[in-house]
Image (cartoon, grey):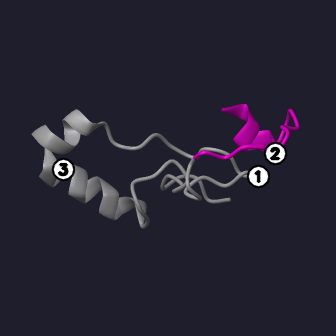
């Protein structure tokens, strides 16, 4: 996503945020949460992946390469 890299185009803040506070209205979504089927069929790998995130499994948690 070039927006994260360049900051262009300028996006408008989210007016109605239905994420329950897990996604910032200024930074927008950072990642997709793990799919439910993965949680059911491969819980050990999901637990390792979430531990690597250094945060909760939500759309507002930055990925390991998202340093800003």
Q: Is residue 35 above or below residue 57?
A: above
Q: Position of residue 42 (x, y in %)?
A: 13, 43
Residue range corresponding to the magenta coloring: 1-18
Give how far apart the Cα atoms at labels 2 and 3 are: 34 Å
Q: Quadrant of the N terminus?
A: top right
Residue of label 2:
13
Name which quarter of the figure residue 57 lies in.
Answer: bottom left
Marks 2/1: CA–CA distance: 5 Å
Residue 45's label in the rendered image is 3
Q: Nearer the viewer, residue 31 or 2?
A: 31
- Report if residue 13 lies within the magenta region: yes
- Categorize mark 3 by other alpha carbons within 10 Å: few (<14), some (14-19), many (20+): few
Q: Quadrant of the C terminus?
A: bottom right
Residue beneath the point at 62% across and 59% down? 67
Of discs 2 and 3, which sits in the foreground? 2
- Camera-side residue of 3 and 65: 3
Residue 26 lies left or right of residue 35; in this view the side is right
Q: Are marks 2 and 1 in contact (CB under 8 Å)?
A: yes
Is 41 drawn above or below residue 45 in the view shown? above
Q: Earlier in the sequence, mark 3 or mark 1?
A: 1
Residue at 59%, 59% (x, y): give it: 21
User: Pointer 1: what residue?
Assistant: 26
Q: Position of residue 32 (x, y in %)?
A: 46, 40
């Amino acid at each position: 996503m070039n927006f994260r890299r360049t900051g262009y185009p300028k996006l408008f803040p989210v007016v109605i945020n239905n994420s329950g506070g897990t996604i910032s209205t200024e930074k927008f979504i950072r990642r997709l949460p793990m799919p439910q089927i993965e949680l059911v069929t491969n819980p050990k790998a999901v637990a390792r992946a979430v531990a690597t995130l250094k945060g909760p499994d939500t759309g507002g948690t930055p990925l390991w390469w998202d340093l800003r």
